[in-house]
Each structure stands twice: as structure tokens, then as C-alpha cells.
Amino acid sequence: MIEMLRDRLRGWWLSLVTLVRPEAAWRRLDDEVRFHLKMEAERLRRAGTMIGEDTMQDLKYGLRMIAKNPVFSAVANVTLALGIGANTAIYTVVEAVLLEPLPGRRLLAAALRG
């Protein structure tokens, strides 16, 4: 119970300090992120993995698969392009029709008010 109260008070105090001195909060956050990045890099180094090595292996594998099955790759890309295009078109229509307020409604509301 006391620990929970102490944690809550500490959270309130940090929130207050953040409001008064936001640059200090950003500095603490930056330090914490840098610490975690260093720890992860150290863990990967100990495991014998270079940070970009896995990415390069994945990229090479993907390029080999594209070269091995060019028709499948083309069909997959066309399907993705059509799906993204259709989704964008539908969202544009929905936004224009349903999400944007109609200008006539604002004029009518202003006329009724007075």
C-alpha cells in the first residue's frame, strides 16, 4: 500500500516537473533510449550478430525468391497496388461524403440561429 502511494506520488511529481521543465524530461527520455540501444547492441555483439547482418540476409533471400518466381512476384505486386488504390479511393469518397461537414448545413444552422 505504501509502495503504491509512493509510486503514485513519484509519478505526479515527474508530471509536474515535466510541465515546468519539458526539456529535462526530453533529455531523460533521450538518455533512457540511448541506454537501451547500447544494451541491445551489446547483447547482439555478444551473440555474434552484427546489427545489419540479418537485414542483409533477409534482403538477399527476398531478391532470390523474386528472381526465382517472377510471375508470382508480379501478381503479388499488382494485387497489392490494386488493393491500396481501391482502399484510397473508397476512403476519399467516405471522407468527402460522410466525414466532412456539408457547407449547406452550416449556412442553414446560421440562418436558423438568427
Image (tube, helix red, strand yellow):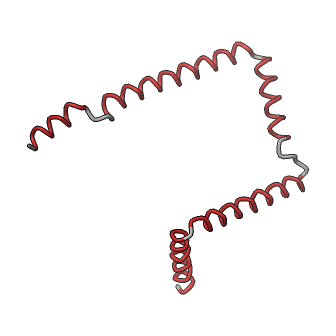
**In the displayed structure, does residue 52 sit left or right of residue 19?**
right
Q: Position of residue 110 (x, y in %)?
A: 15, 40
- In which quadrant of the rendered view does residue 6 lie? bottom right
Q: Position of residue 23 (x, y in %)?
A: 60, 64
Q: From this view, report whether residue 72 is shown above or below residue 6.
A: above
Q: From this view, report whether residue 94 is shown above or below residue 46.
A: above
Number of disc labels: 0
**In the displayed structure, does residue 8 sit left or right of residue 78?**
left
Which residue corresponds to the image point at 56% horizontal and 78% vertical from the top-left? 10
Quadrant in the picture for the C terminus: top left
Q: Position of residue 27 (x, y in %)?
A: 66, 64
Q: Nearer the viewer, residue 97 or 107?
A: 107
Q: Residue furthest bottom?
A: 2
Which residue corresponds to the image point at 58% horizontal and 19% vertical from the top-left? 79
Which residue corresponds to the image point at 57% horizontal and 20% vertical from the top-left? 81
Q: Position of residue 105 (x, y in %)?
A: 19, 34
- In which quadrant of the rendered view does residue 113 lie? top left
**In the displayed structure, does residue 72 sit left or right of residue 86?**
right
Q: Nearer the viewer, residue 3 or 52?
A: 52
Q: From this view, report whether residue 113 is shown above or below residue 2.
A: above
Which residue corresponds to the image point at 51% horizontal and 75% vertical from the top-left? 12
